Amino acid sequence: MVVNLKSQNDLSGFYIIYEGSTNLEKPGWYGISHILEHLLCKTFLHLMEDFDRDSISWNAYTDSNIINFHFTGLESKLSKYRNKILDALSKFSITKEQFEIERDIVLSEYEDYFNSQSEAHSMNLSRKLFNDYDPIGLKSDLVNLNFLDCINFFELQFQHPSKIINVSKTYKMKDNEIEFSNIKILKNVAYGNYDVPFELGNDFKDKTSLLMLGPIIDKNHAEINLINIMMSMGLTSQLYKEVREKRGLVYYIHCYQSRMHTQGLVTIGTMTANKNVKKVIDCVEEVLNNPKAFLNKQRFDLIKDFYTTKRLKEEILRYDNVGHHILPEGWSIYDILDTVKLKDLKDIYSEYYDFSKFYVSNDKKEFQK
């Protein structure tokens, strides 16, 4: 489908979304989506000097659900590239030599990920609990991946985009101009305890990474995102106030919902000194057991005002702010902003935020020798 958005100025954006990503990977292919994203950037290598000349900004990324190629610039400049970009991405014009070089680059990136304590913890835990290898993949699969595998995955994932987001003051793209993907993804996740390889190359001695994971979520994703923001946005939020500002136990603490195809997972994550692990866990439990401190009208109105103004700001720079149009319907806070009730959030909170049902992971105990 094409999503046409009207820009408020002469700047335009062009986003090509491929739904699937790691949801389409199989044993032997873990990490192939990410490699193909890198390789497909080479299909428009012949345009890159022109992009520089015309000040076209571009990039691409792979997450667990989509691959996104995105381009922004003045409409007078970007207009001549839309069809050329789509044409380039539709062709697997990659050589075996390019594949082998790019695989080495991705393997270097792989090492960088696991040199980060929090990233290593998160990715090893994802393997253990869900048999999920994240976009970065599995090293042995990347090493053994061959050129034919990439051709086969291109035909599965990249023959046609799932969605195009076109932002322009003057130009509208028509659905019938593009053939879109009809990939059907049938995937559900559940907690398990998988016998899988972990990356344990580093001994992070000075600090402990903590991850606290809630139950699998099948609905109310936008409401869950709003609850997380009410609990954790800024130094005046209850999580920051109690764990950082009052007790000085952490520098940061995140609370977010990961999207796993159609399901979600609330994760509270931080790092702390080894001696403070129990204090942090106890403090987080205390916050979650006292929702009245943040699920109240004052905080609700403040966060709604924040998103109302944020939406207006994003409209001014619409060409570069399309994140909620990339998400499936029902995931963005903007989908519910004008209709959500505080009572709804309280009911949903009681269903998903019982700390006794959270999986608490300490990387020192689970993944470090």
Image (cartoon, helix red, strand yellow):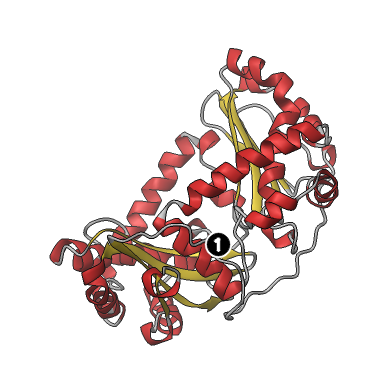
- Quadrant placement of the C terminus: bottom left
Specify whether 209 is left or right of 8.
left
Q: Is residue 65 above or below residue 339?
A: above
Which quadrant of the figure has residue 206?
bottom left
Q: Can residue 4 be seen in the rendering of this structure?
A: no
Residue at 50% over, 69% down: 125
Dot 1 falls on a residue whose secondary structure is loop
**Which residue is rendered at x = 65% and y = 23% of the image?**
78
Q: Which residue is mark 1?
A: 331
Question: Which quadrant of the view contains residue 40?
Answer: top right
Residue closest to the eye, 119 or 282: 119
Would residue 75 be visible to someone looking at this image?
yes
Q: Number of labelled discs?
A: 1
Identity, as a three-letter code, of the amino acid under mark 1: Trp
Q: Residues within 10 Å of mark 1 (few under 14, many from 20)?
A: many
Residue drawn at point x = 40 percent, y = 84 percent: 350
Q: Residue at x 81, y 35 (%)?
A: 96
Q: In the image, residue 276 lies at what x, y percent?
A: 22, 70
Q: Is 67 drawn above or below residue 80 in the view shown?
A: below
Give the percent coordinates (x, y) of residue 200: 49, 62
Q: Quadrant of residue 105?
A: top right
Percent position of residue 118, x then y? 41, 58
Instruction: Tell whether 1 sits left or right of 113.
Output: right
Is 89 rendered above or below residue 197? Answer: above
Q: Nearer the viewer, residue 300 or 290?
A: 290
